Amino acid sequence: MNRAMLHRIAIAFGCAALVAGPALAEEPARLSGYNANISESSVSGISSGAFMAIQFGTAWSSVIKGVGIVAGGPFWCAKADADDFINGFTLPVMTATGSCMSGPLPDLSAFFAKADAKSASGDIDSLQFVSRQKIYIFHGYNDAVVKRPVTDATAAFYRHYLGETNRGNLYYQTTIGAGHSLVVAQDPHKNGPNDCRDNAAPFIDACGYDQAGIILQHIYGALNAPNRGQLTGTTKRFDQSAYTRPDDPGPLSLGDTGFVFVPRPCENGEACRVHIALHGCRQDAGDIDRRFIDNTGYNSWADTNHLIVLYPQTASSSLLPFNPEACWDWWSYINHEDSYVTKSGSQIRTIKAMVDALTARATPAPAPAAAPNSLTVIDTSDTGADLAWTAQAGTTAYRVRRAGADGQFAVLGDVAGPSFADSGLTPQTAYRWRISPVANGIEDPAFMEAAASTRAVPPPCENPGSCAIGK
């Protein structure tokens, strides 16, 4: 494997200095089990973590109800296969640092064929489960690392499996002027995030945009407001070697220690859900300490919404595997076979073992406490809007209607689950939406209503990282 190629990954995904974080609660080596239904689990990630989120969410789509993707390419993007590593171990990493970052990826047939073959063989779950997942995709127009053609390909990959019936499950945001980063809402001079258009460590940019909250609500529906003060839950360390067995963490380029945030009600046995948050290259605890864990906003939302947040950790490795930037394995640097995108992939099976441990004490129980019964427009782009509301017991679907300038509501369709991504809208235009519960084909006359305006089309951005931030 060519060190120069991996150095391109170092430049692309950056590095960060260690930053001290608050003390952690002392914890036993293994994860505790909680009353969390594994089929209510979800995953999100940034950059290499986004590639892994897609791999994990596709491999285990039967238990992953939603995937959040920030600057990531489609399933099997690097096209790593055993034959690719015969001569110098170079082809997959060249693809990973080439077209999987800059594009174009016009022909997706190879990605569909690989996913279909792995599904048919049972190496990943049936792709019918992907068709019901809630998908959030993000490209910041100041991203100088992963270009928009790559995330366009990711959107096309999911649209292929969602089909027209479930098109409202996918929300694609491209109008925020963020650099290559997980985006947060707070002022850039507090808690360490960068300015909005930065493409530098720690790859957490403040754009007045609460990305963690939007991802979680797109997946789960309207949630209670986040806790912006002192959290009542606890961040815990755990020994990752308990979940890499029979391997040690090092040969899998994983850290010895992982982290998990557990809200107090979950500790007390109340029904909860698990979200997996995957950092990018050089965002692991060995490089930036707890900044990804503490400063990205997931815990604030989790604290008030019965959400356990799992933060698995990679580690840099300079021998075998050669992964000096602590990236997640999305070009098969561990075993040089295509199993890295399947259930048996070393890192995927490790994360699944962690989720299994966290959900080990699930019992039939009421769903976690919901937010007030209301419809909310949680985000808008220039041509889309993301709607979320509270799930209602006994409902089998929700009917979505939209009204434009003429004030006349038209049915857009039915959706399963309490969120809907509208698309094909006109920029800078006001719209209204109505959501009605449907039970066994019968529509409830009661409805929820909300209104919002779409954003302006961003100006052309020829030099990402230096383009103006729109309002």
Image (cartoon, rainbow, N blue to C red):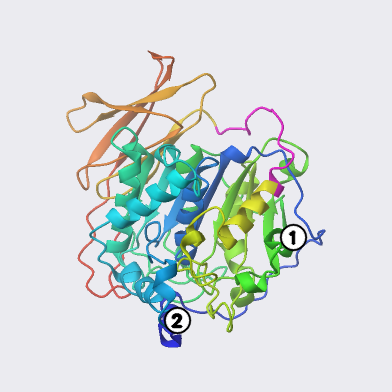
The residue wearing badge 1 is 242
- 445 left or right, relative to 288: left
Q: Residue at x 60, y 52 (%)?
A: 300
Considering the whole magenta stretch, tell me its main secondary structure: loop
Identify the amino acid type marked 1. Answer: Ala
- 13 left or right, relative to 413: right
Which x, y percent locates residue 163?
30, 38
Q: Which residues are magenta?
A: 357-371
Please determine whether, in this image, residue 418 is positioned above or below residue 161. above
Is residue 210 visible in this depiction of the protein?
A: no
**Does dot 2 land on a helix, a strand or a loop?**
helix
Q: In the figure, residue 18 lies in which quadrant?
A: bottom right
Which x, y percent locates residue 457?
22, 55
Identify the amino acid type marked 2. Answer: Leu
The residue wearing badge 2 is 6
Q: Please check the rendered image and state whether residue 139 is part of the magenta-colored stretch, yes or no.
A: no
Is residue 8 visible in this depiction of the protein?
A: yes
Please tell me which of labels 1 and 2 falls first in the chain. 2
| 10 Å crowding of disc 2: few (<14), some (14-19), many (20+) | some
Q: Residue at x 64, y 54 (%)?
A: 229
